[in-house]
Image (cartoon, grey):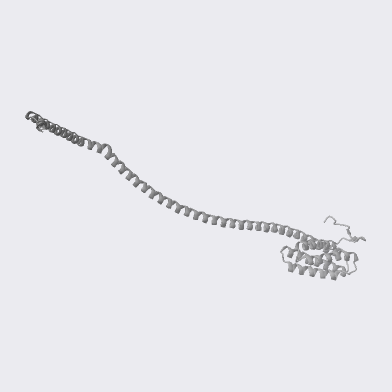
């Protein structure tokens, strides 16, 4: 037991060396800690601003720019929405104007159709007026011929002594021809009632003349009466046909009132000795 206790106890010199080594290790550790603290402090002093400038500040700038971009985008969206609304309102207004223009165009087309119809009516009226003028000219020419016939008859009566009955017959025929001329004028003026009255009066007058001594004229007068009957039948429904029948009767009556004589053949056709070119 005594041997073990002797071996474990250090000597005084070893104790001093061990104490000195512990002090040196402590100082060395303290120096390392101080150096590390200084290095860490220097790193913090110089590294934090650099880190702020290189990492944190750009991130803040980027975040600010992103916020600005978001705000600008919101403004653009708001402006775009307003523009879209305004464009929609303008589109509705344009559609309304187009509808109004369409209605105005339809009204103008309707007015144009009315004008075209009016023009066509005016053309028809002008055409009818021209036909009326032509018919009036024809009637004027026929009246001139009738006046010439009357003058010729007066001249013949002055030169030749005829029986009173023959003279009265000629005067009745001339009166009937005058009535037919008036009837033709009434037809030109579309006055069918007065035209029918004149035709009826002329027909009754010819009935009184038919049956006299001049048998050759009676055949022609019968033809004239037939034409007048046809004219009276057609005057209400087809005035144009009635006018044609009346014109034929008038021309036959003109031939009858000629002072020249005529011949009658069995077929009933009349051959005149003069004035065949009329």
Foreground residue among 10 and 264:
10
Horizontal and vertical percent position of residue 172:
83, 68
Q: Quadrant of the C terminus?
A: bottom right
Q: Residue at x 39, y 48 (%)?
A: 77
Q: Quadrant of residue 218?
A: bottom right
Seen in the picture, residue 267 relative to 7 is either above or below; the reply is: below
The one nearer the camera, 217 or 192, is: 192
The residue depicted at 57 percent of the width and 56 percent of the height is 106
Q: In this view, does 156 lie to the left or right of 108?
A: right
- Across the whole image, how many numbered discs are drawn on residues? 0
Q: Where is residue 115 in the image (x, y as percent from the top left)?
A: 61, 57
Instruction: Pick whichever, 82 or 182, lies toward us.
Output: 82
The residue positioned farthest toward the left in the image shown: 12
| 233 lies left or right of 118 | right
Seen in the picture, residue 36 relative to 160 is either above or below; the reply is above
Residue 219 percent across, percent down from the top left: 88, 64
Decide if residue 161 is in sight here.
Answer: no
Q: In which quarter of the image is residue 195?
A: bottom right
Q: Quadrant of residue 184?
A: bottom right
Q: In the image, residue 7 lies at what x, y percent?
A: 11, 30
Residue drawn at point x = 29 percent, y = 40 percent? 59
Quadrant in which the N terminus appears: top left
The answer to whether residue 233 is visible is yes
Spot the residue most to the front.
Answer: 1
């Amino acid at each position: 037991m005594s041997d073990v206790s002797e071996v474990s106890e250090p000597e005084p010199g070893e104790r001093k060396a061990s104490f000195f080594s512990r002090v040196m290790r402590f100082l060395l550790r303290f120096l390392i800690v101080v150096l590390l603290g200084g290095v860490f402090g220097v790193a913090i002093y110089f590294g934090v601003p650099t880190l702020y400038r290189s990492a944190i500040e750009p991130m803040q700038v980027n975040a600010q720019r992103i916020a600005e971009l978001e705000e600008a985008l919101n403004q653009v969206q708001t402006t775009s929405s307003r523009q879209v609304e305004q464009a929609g309102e303008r589109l509705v207004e344009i559609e309304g104007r187009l509808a109004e223009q369409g209605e105005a165009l339809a009204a103008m087309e309707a007015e144009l159709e009315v004008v075209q119809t009016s023009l066509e009516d005016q053309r028809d009226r002008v055409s009818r007026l021209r036909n009326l003028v032509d018919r009036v000219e024809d009637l004027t020419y026929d009246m001139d011929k009738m006046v010439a016939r009357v003058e010729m008859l007066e001249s013949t009566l002055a030169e030749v002594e005829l029986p009173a009955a023959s003279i009265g017959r000629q005067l009745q025929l001339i009166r009937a021809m005058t009535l037919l001329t008036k009837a033709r004028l009434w037809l030109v003026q579309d006055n069918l009632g007065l035209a029918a009255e004149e035709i009826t009066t002329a027909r009754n007058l010819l009935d009184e003349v038919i049956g006299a001594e001049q048998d050759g004229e009676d055949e022609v007068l019968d033809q004239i009466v037939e034409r007048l009957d046809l004219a009276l039948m057609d005057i209400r429904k087809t005035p144009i046909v009635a006018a044609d029948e009346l014109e034929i009767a008038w021309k036959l009556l003109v031939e009858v009132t000629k002072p020249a004589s005529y011949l009658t053949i069995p077929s009933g056709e009349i051959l005149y000795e003069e004035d065949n070119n009329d």
